[in-house]
Image (tube, grey):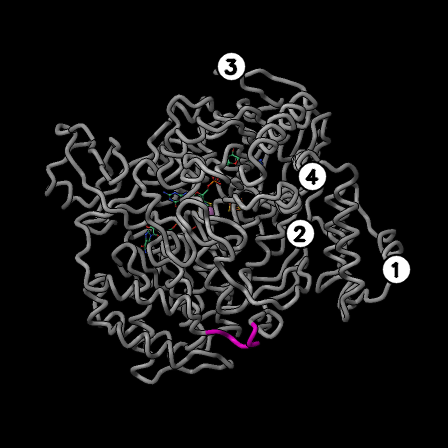
């Protein structure tokens, strides 16, 4: 007997619907794209197709581990939690709560446990030493959106299905399947854009597969997108092409700032011909509708926040913000009105380097400083949840050493890997298929309004769910007893009944609680959020609830994006802040480097379709072939530097020996190495055989994007040497 289940794929931001066949023993026998999903319409990629293998990977941990010296011992859950309680208790008694650090990795964004239980856990720990993959990723976008629109999640996405013109910088959705732009079958949507006569322009130091399918590819020197974007803004003002449709503050300041960046001047810095910059400006302004979209290549860069800001400056001054075909704000089903309060960054600073807080966290680029530097608030206890910072953070080697010096470390992770090997206790979540799935975060950035819930496909079989693991950690940290979910539900309900205009204003909390459905705390909380949300049965504008999503297992289309700037804006002024003082100040830093001579060779990253950051190299069918860790380099550079099949890459921080992949798809003077590799000696047996090297041996934790504290991975100065001349370093 086999059974069929429908689930959302949790492996990237595209949220594809999948249809899985399971045999009697709960083994996955096939994975297909769910044709009836109204959003993904049957699309699937090689990673999604491997979900069954991933879930049953023999190297996944099924029991908690405790480390004693070099030895790992499988223990019961009670033993494991008792060890965490002891470890945490000893460190906090002696050194206080600020000696506790937390690192949250990327998969937290892709599972309900991380979304629902992360915040209560952080609160119960009571520490400001909070770090996450966000400061190695998209923090510049949050800071730019927070300052311009008043909320860090007010991120407009390109209206992919309707736009006439898409200018895309530093993104390669044909490999990544998209980011901060939730669009299953991104490649198909781009094809459709071109088929309806639209134009796609891709700006990237490499001619990627996405660039290959575009109408135009523009090579740009790494780390210089802010100059390029300013050049476009400059032209739009200079040629009187601006058409602002919203009330904004700061238009004159932006126009003033842009005067310093005329196309012929930024051309020297960016490598983009001045006439191309001028033409792009004219095309953007003339298009019936247009969208500017920029992703990781422009975020993890020296001027990441300025680039993200200028993207939306362009969307505003070309009249494309918040209109069909332009860039728009999604309306997720679990959204619940938040009070208007001005967004700020830097409410506190990191202890050692005085780097600003953003969104309640500190830059991962300073985590090693906080562990290594003695004094009050030194991190001595570290909790990592779904993260592998040894491979993913800048100068991961330094973190690797720092983790070895911690008094106590706990990791919630299914694998024993480069990071978790330092833990004293590893708490593994059970199989993915035992968890329910709802994309609280990613549907904020969807190109269509949509909701889909996948209930658990398999029973838990005695193990705690990841939600239960995090809830138990919260109880340990808070010293409280009781039901965390009921506590959170009570709090949310009280807030809702007190909020004028909430749809349940003035109603009775006990009565409302009795109306909630769900088989678990997570489901009850989802039901509450759906009912209170904009399509919810309590908000009075719809009938959405957990029940309705369970009755529609392929997901519900909630329609194309609608203009909604008024609902989204949370600035103190009530209008768009086009020239936030912090950013105008950072423009001085940008100006300061305008005439700087670029390094001879710089390093950038890249992603592979069959890879997922650092943690999917353990699946045989996905590794090998084009999915290997090679240094892309232009043949002219190979010849000029006299290189053979391998070379030594050296940066200010480290040195690697890497196989070369000569290709004319990369600019001369630029080399590219993918991240997430470097598994030599790993307990992940397949990954260890395809080890590669970690690019983050070379990246520099002292280089950050100033306004957001984000790590800089693109544009790292390196030298490349033939393998024969290795010297001590
Ligand atoms: N298959 C796969 N999918 C993934 C992931 C994965 O590892 N594998 N990771 C997921 C995650 S965590 C994220 S955040 C997203 C990221 O999604 P994307 O942002 O689409 O990421 P990439 O595919 O790395 O594309 C970034 C592009 O930026 C270019 N680039 C580098 N430096 C610069 C620069 O200075 N300027 C410009 N204009 N371009 C530059 C690179 O050459 C590269 O082509 O992908 C997600 N999806
Ligand atoms: N040089 C360079 N470095 C980069 C980047 C780059 O482009 N260049 N990209 C950056 C980006 S965008 C990101 S998002 C970060 C990612 O940085 P991280 O989030 O630190 O790293 P991942 O490789 O995603 O590691 C995910 C971890 O979560 C575990 N895991 C997987 N699923 C689950 C789950 O359901 N529950 C739990 N508890 N654990 C799970 C995996 O075993 C793995 O240990 O890397 C960043 N680092
Ligand atoms: S594109 Fe992303 S969500 Fe879709 S199947 Fe592939 S990994 Fe899963
Ligand atoms: Mo990411």
Where is mark 2, residue-wise?
Answer: 452
- Marks 3 and 1 in Cβ contact (< 8 Å): no
In the displayed structure, 90 sits above or below 554; it is: above
In the displayed structure, 293 sits above or below 385; it is: below
Say the numbered circle drawn on residue 508: 1
Q: Residues within 10 Å of mark 2 (few under 14, many from 20)?
A: many
| Ligand 2 within 8 Å of the CB at mark 3 | no
Where is mark 4, residue-wise?
Answer: 478
In the figure, is residue 720 to the left or right of 180? left
Instruction: For marks 4 and 3, give the CA distance.
Output: 30 Å
Q: Nearer the viewer, residue 527 or 729?
A: 729
Say the numbered circle drawn on residue 459: none
* Residue depth check, mark 2 versus mark 3: number of the one nearer the observer: 3
- Region of the chain picked out in magenta, as a range: 572-577
Tell me, yes or no, if residue 176 can be seen here.
no
- Marks 4 and 3 in Cβ contact (< 8 Å): no
* Quarter the C terminus occupies: top left
Determine the secondary structure under disc 4: helix
Tell me which label, 2 or 3, sits earlier in the chain.
Answer: 3
* Residue depth check, mark 2 versus mark 1: number of the one nearer the observer: 1
Tell me, yes or no, if residue 6 can be seen here.
yes
Say the numbered circle drawn on residue 71: 3
Residue 34 % position (x, y): 61, 46
């Amino acid at each position: 007997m086999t059974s069929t289940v429908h689930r959302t794929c949790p492996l990237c931001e595209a949220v594809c619907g999948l249809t899985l066949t399971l045999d009697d023993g709960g083994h996955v026998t096939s994975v297909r794209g769910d044709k009836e999903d109204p959003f993904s319409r049957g699309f699937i990629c090689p990673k999604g197709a491997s979900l069954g293998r991933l879930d049953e990977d023999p190297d996944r941990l099924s029991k908690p581990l405790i480390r004693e010296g070099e030895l790992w011992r499988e223990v019961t859950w009670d033993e494991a939690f008792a060890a965490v309680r002891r470890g945490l208790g000893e460190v906090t008694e002696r050194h206080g709560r600020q000696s506790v650090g937390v690192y949250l990795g990327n998969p937290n964004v892709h599972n309900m446990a991380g979304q629902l239980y992360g915040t209560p856990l952080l609160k119960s720990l009571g520490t400001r030493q909070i770090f996450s993959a966000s400061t190695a990723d998209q923090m510049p976008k949050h800071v730019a959106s927070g300052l311009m629109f008043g909320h860090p999640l007010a991120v407009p996405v390109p209206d992919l299905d309707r736009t006439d013109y898409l200018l895309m910088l530093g993104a390669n959705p044909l490999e990544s399947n998209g980011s901060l732009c939730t669009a299953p079958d991104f490649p198909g949507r781009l094809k459709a854009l071109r088929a309806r006569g639209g134009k796609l322009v891709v700006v990237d130091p490499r001619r990627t597969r996405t660039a290959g399918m575009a109408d135009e590819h523009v090579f740009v020197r790494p780390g210089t997108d802010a100059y390029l974007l300013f050049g476009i803004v400059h032209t739009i003002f200079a040629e009187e092409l601006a058409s602002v449709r919203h009330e904004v503050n700061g238009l004159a300041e932006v126009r003033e700032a842009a005067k310093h960046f005329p196309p012929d001047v930024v051309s020297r810095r960016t490598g983009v011909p001045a006439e191309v910059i001028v033409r792009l400006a004219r095309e953007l302004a003339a298009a019936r509708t247009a969208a500017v979209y920029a992703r990781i290549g422009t975020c993890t860069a020296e001027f990441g926040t300025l680039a993200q800001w200028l993207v939306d400056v362009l969307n505003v001054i070309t009249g494309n913000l918040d209109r069909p075909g332009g860039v728009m704000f999604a309306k997720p089903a679990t959204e619940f009105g938040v009070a208007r309060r001005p967004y700020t960054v830097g409410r506190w600073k990191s202890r050692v380097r005085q780097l600003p807080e953003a969104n309640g966290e500190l830059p991962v680029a300073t985590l090693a400083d906080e562990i290594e530097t003695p004094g009050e608030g030194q991190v001595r206890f570290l909790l990592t949840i779904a993260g592998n910072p040894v491979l993913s953070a800048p100068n991961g080697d330094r973190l690797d050493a720092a983790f070895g010096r911690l008094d106590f470390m706990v990791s919630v992770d299914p694998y024993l890997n480069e990071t978790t090997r330092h833990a004293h206790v590893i708490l593994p979540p059970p199989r993915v298929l035992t968890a329910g799935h709802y994309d609280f975060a990613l549907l904020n950035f969807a190109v269509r309004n949509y909701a889909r819930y996948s209930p658990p496909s398999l029973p838990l079989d005695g193990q705690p769910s990841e939600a239960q693991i995090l809830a138990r950690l919260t109880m340990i940290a808070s010293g409280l007893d009781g039901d965390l979910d009921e506590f959170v539900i009570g709090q949310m309900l009280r807030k809702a009944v007190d909020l004028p205009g909430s749809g349940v204003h003035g109603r009775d909390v006990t009565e409302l609680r009795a109306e909630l459905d769900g088989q678990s705390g997570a489901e009850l909380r989802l039901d509450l959020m759906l009912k209170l949300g904009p399509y919810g049965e309590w908000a009075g504008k719809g009938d959405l609830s957990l029940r309705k999503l369970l009755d529609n297992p392929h997901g519900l289309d909630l329609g194309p994006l609608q203009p909604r700037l008024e609902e989204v804006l949370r600035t103190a002024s009530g209008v768009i802040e086009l020239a936030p003082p912090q950013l105008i100040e950072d423009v001085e830093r940008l100006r300061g480097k305008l005439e700087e001579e670029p390094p001879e060779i710089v390093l950038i990253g890249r992603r592979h379709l069959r890879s997922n950051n650092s943690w999917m190299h353990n699946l045989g069918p996905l590794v090998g072939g084009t999915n290997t860790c090679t240094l892309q380099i232009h043949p002219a550079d190979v010849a000029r530097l006299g290189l053979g099949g391998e070379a030594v890459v050296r940066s200010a921080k480290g040195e690697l020996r890497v196989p070369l992949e000569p290709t004319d798809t990369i600019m001369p003077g630029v080399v590219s190495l993918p991240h997430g590799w470097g598994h030599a000696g790993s307990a992940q047996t397949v990954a260890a055989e395809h080890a590669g090297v970690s690019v983050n041996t070379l990246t520099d934790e002292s280089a950050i994007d100033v306004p957001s504290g984000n790590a800089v991975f693109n544009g790292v100065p390196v030298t490349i040497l033939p393998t024969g001349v290795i010297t001590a370093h």
